[in-house]
Image (spheres, grey):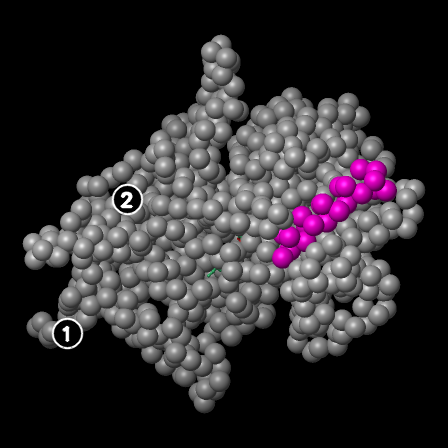
Amino acid sequence: MEFLLGRLLSNNLLNLGLKDICEEGLKDFGIDLGELETVEPDAGLGNGGLGRLAACFLDSLASLQMPGHGCGIRYRHGLFEQKIVNGYQVELPDNWLQDGYVWEVRKPERAVIVKFGGNIRMEIKGKNPVFIHENYEPVRAVPYDLPVVGYNCGTVNTLRLWSAEADDFDFSSFSKGDYLKAVEHKYNVENTTQVLYPEDSHLEGKILRLKQQYFFVSAGLLSIVRRYKKTFGTTMEALKKFHERIAIHINDTHPALAIPELMRILMDEEGFGWEEAWDVTVKTISYTNHTILPEALEKWPMDLFKGLLPRIYMIVEEINERFCKKLWEQYPGQWERIRHMAILSDNYVHMAHLSVVGSHSVNGVAKIHSEILKKEVMSNFNQFYPHKFNNKTNGVTHRRWLANCNPSLSALITEAIGPSWLTHPEDLTALEPYANDSSFQEKAAKIKRRNKEALANHISDYTGVNLDVDSLLDVHVKRIHAYKRQVLNALQIMDMYNRIRDNPNLDIVPRTFLFAGKAAPGYHLAKQTIKLVNTLADIINNDPIVKDRIKVVFVPNYSVSLAELIIPATNVSEQISTASKEASGTGNMKFMMNGAVTICTMDGANVEMYEEVGEENIITFGLSAEQVIRYYTFGGYNVMDEYHGDQRIKTVVDQLVNGFLGTGYNEFSDIHHLLMGTNDEYFILKDFSSYVDAQNRINDFYKDQTIWRSMAVNNIAFSSRFSTDRTISEYAIDIWKIKPLVVRSGRRF
Ligand code: 26W
């Protein structure tokens, strides 16, 4: 449902082997490619990690010459633009299509009709019941195709984005003279794909979102089946082999309606019986889970679901009935267990349950996350379907996130180890010996500094803050969320500030704390967190006692393009989620690839980064996932022990509400409540002390630049496992059973 593409121009040039020559050619005309690029709008058709992962997958699929395509929604408005006014987030619509979009090709001849609402009539034809959908609202789905260009291989796949369109006039209404009704109809239909929902970890049960889900799923499946029949024939024989030639992957539960929709098409349109259709469906579909936060697990009120999708509801009911019957056979009398696993229960349709039941593979996105799925969140399902569960650790495309966004570092790497790493990221490990090569270290450090200068220019343009390019750049960028613990970082900065005020000669390396990220518009705590960071920036950056040794900056409107500027300049990467909560993280990998040192909890993919790079090259702290889960299950934690037991903690918590920050007393009351009113649900205060210790270790390592630089180079070398080339190869072999389809043998550059 989301593809967070960012800009395509320079990435496509890189993958086509044309970037250098274009850069040179444009120079002759006095045009800078980097500047020209900024004319392209960022395609922000995603919220964060999940959508960006999908975009990285597309790059690796094409670059590995795999026949794999994307299917999504052409939102008229992508994720909102963030402005900061007086320290507060303000949302503006993202009008990314206003000047047209050069990469898309509209294909009106491939349009399909998606049907909403109405009623279902059953007829008996011969001996079999057939279901006829009547009085529905037809919505025309028009595809816009974007090319997905593989790296140096000739493969160009497709990302097909669907747009809802109505005929200019609804003639039946218009002929009756009801002009307004006709225009209203057009408006309502086109509303379906108007806007991306900006919540990335909390479900708002809005009917329009369910409509979006069915809209793109139905359109996508109708177009897949149409293409399949054209290629392999329309006979029942051919259709029964559907799963041998087609694999459909659902990115979280957002497209889970693919399960009942494929059942519907096979039964109602192609004449399959239930058993045959179910066999093909389960063998076709696979599912990735991206979050275990309970508030993010999708469930839809039954009534709303039934009204919008009457035929799909009937099919889900039948899936549920047959599933519960099987559970009953396996667990006779265990009503509670069955109720917990049912697809329909408590008046809701549980989309994660539907996804597990209707697919042949369920994977998490990092080892620890997949284990938590199996042992905790989906343990019942794992017992019932142990063969379905597996892990596929996330990655990022190292072509966009190293080669394209950090061309100088990339050239230095190629100079040292040759260019094979661009297509074989595992070759990056050949850099290891360079970690202690002082000339390489020096060159890498110079590049980092130049990247900081480029970032500093942007920041002074957008925030007026002058970034000290000689300071340690400590970066916390991602969506703002309690579990990601931007608040922990802010409290630690407050403590550091208090220490400087107490001892103006405190021995610390100059540091810039950079934050960026969007808050969901209705998420008050996240919005207060942004205000808190901006308030700290105001106080600290203007305090003469600090003498510019620490600075705080919040960079507005975090996006793919901004990440491409920030990440190559970063020294310290903050990955400090409450252990067990961050499924994987992918920003963590991008920073590592660009030679930042990570300060982190043992959560998500941080655990595997630690395994790869070794304990001497990463700074870890805090409770383990096991400890966190144990506290949640058995209790035993009291935030008052932290508050009263550590003067530093008491001071910074009190400073949130005692006027110290120069704002109204209630300005940060939600944050105060998060800490003190919920018994510190995210263990921010519990982890505070070990976080401060970890920050001190960073300080000490950075003082010795030889050590620091060797850590940085080791991080680049051992990031090789986190390329989506590795991730996609695993999906291809274990789940999709697809192989490269060579369109052009031999690499040209
Ligand atoms: C229903 C609202 C909603 C919208 C989006 C709920 C949940 C989501 C996503 C599943 C949230 C998400 O982006 N999850 C992130 O997925 C990344 C890619 O796998 C992981 O790296 C992140 O850890 C995970 O938070």
Q: CA distance from mark 2 to mark 1?
A: 32 Å
- Label 2 vs label 1, nearer the camera: 2
Which mark is drawn over residue 122? 1
* Amino acid beneath label 2: Pro
Say which residue label 2 marks. Answer: 143
Please provide the residue range marked out in magenta: 528-548
Tell me if residue 714 comes above or below residue 78 in the rendering.
above
Where does the image place residue 235, in percent across and percent down from the top left? Answer: 16, 54
Point out residue 210 in the picture as x, y percentages from the top left corner: 35, 62
Q: Do callouts 2 and 1 mark residues in contact (Cβ within 8 Å)? A: no
Is disc 2 placed on a helix, strand or loop? Answer: strand
The residue located at (67%, 72%) in the rendering is 678
Question: Where residue 367 is drawn, which disc sits there?
Answer: none
Q: Where is 368 relative to 156, above or below?
A: below
Mark 2 / mark 1, whichever is N-terminal: 1
In the image, 247 versus 241, the foreground residue is 247
Q: Main secondary structure of the magenta part?
A: helix
Left or right: 432, with 10 as reference point: right
Task: Identify the secondary structure beneath mark 1.
Answer: strand
CB of mark 1 near ligand 1 (< 8 Å): no
Residue 426 is at least partly visible in this image = no
Residue 88 rendering spot, x and y as whole percentages: 59, 51
